[in-house]
Amino acid sequence: MTDFENDPDYEECLVTFFDVLGFRNLLHTRSGAEIRHLLSMFRRVSEGDTTPPTRSDEMRMISEVHAEIVSDAIVRTRTIETQYQAGPLVWELIDLLHIQIECVANGILVRGAMTIGPMHLGIDFSGPVFGPALVQAYFMEEGEVIFPRIAIHEDVIERHRQDQTLWREGHSYEDEERHLNNLLRQDESGLHYIDYLRASLSELDGEYAGWIEFLGRHKTLVESGLADSPNATVRRKYSWLKNYHNAVIDENMANLEPGAMTEDGDPCEALFSGLRIDA
């Protein structure tokens, strides 16, 4: 049996496998340049110009991001260095959050699954890309992540509780847990997924006004999907998004101060009520 921990060709990574929903329709409605730009976001979000190791026995000194893109199947990896506490999990979750924000802005949806474990990436990311973590991510995305969201395998959550190399330097577990609670949501089965609607508030330009605009775009995207879904299977995905969207709106309305007004002098309650999806 392979000893992944001591095999120099493998390294520990956070791995996310994505599927772009409705990709066949994109091929017929978007130009090649538009599709190239959309898919490249999975690579360009935080993929830096760092200098890779030159020998297999060198430790990768910093956490690095890489993405492999083949049509609508995308594999994104973030290496986990062990010398410094750079907080790879939180930073990767933030990157995935931004990917979802960009996807919504461009009118597309993704489904994905994140796992953690051994991967072969090649010394300079020359590949081939393979490993048990990718297999686990693929099967989780294919079998468990039914709706348009990025789910986090329970092994990632458990590993984060125990492994300080996943934390940021100077952070306690309570610090890290607070950040994860701000980024993740759990469904009724206990599955964690990125809470991109709520978490986007602190990540968008224009702060509150930018968040309201984003929620409006999301509402339009979901309403269009519900109206144009070709079959019941696709419609169920948009129905889940509708429920998720309305839950975030309702939670925010419940936390409003009585009589709260926008900067333009409009009642906040009326503003958020108008963002609910009633289709």
Image: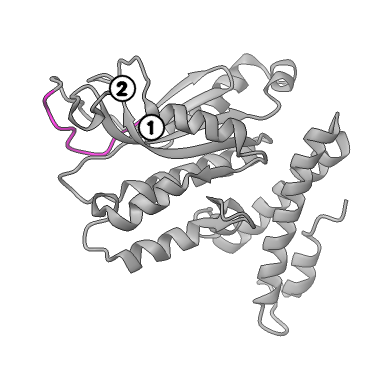
Q: Residue at x 67, y 23 (%)?
A: 23
Q: Say which quadrant the N terminus sits in.
A: top left
Q: Residue at x 19, y 33 (%)?
A: 60
What sort of colour scheme is used for the picture? one colour
3 or 215, nearer to the observer: 3
Classify mark 2: helix, strand or loop: loop
Q: Position of residue 88 (x, y in %)?
A: 32, 46
Which span of residues is magenta-colored? Answer: 57-65
Q: Is residue 3 visible?
A: yes
Classify mark 1: helix, strand or loop: strand
How many numbered circles does the render carry?
A: 2
Give the left or right position of residue 70, taking residue 162 as reference: right
Give the left or right position of residue 148, taking residue 59 as reference: right
Q: Is residue 266 visible?
A: no
Farthest residue, direction front: 1
Tag 2: amino acid: Leu
Residue under numbered circle 1: 77
Farthest residue, direction bottom: 258
Q: Position of residue 123 (x, y in %)?
A: 22, 20
232 or 21, nearer to the observer: 232
Give the left or right position of residue 278, taking residue 248 as reference: right
Is mark 2 in CB contact (under 8 Å) with mark 1? Answer: yes
Q: Position of residue 106 (x, y in %)?
A: 64, 35
- The residue carrying pointer 2 sits among few (fewer than 14), some (14 to 19) or many (20 or more) residues within 10 Å by Cα, namely many
**Label 2, label 1: how many angstroms apart (C-alpha)?**
9 Å
Residue under numbered circle 2: 121
As for residue 58 lying within the magenta part, the answer is yes
8 or 29, nearer to the observer: 8
Q: Position of residue 33 (x, y in %)?
A: 59, 17
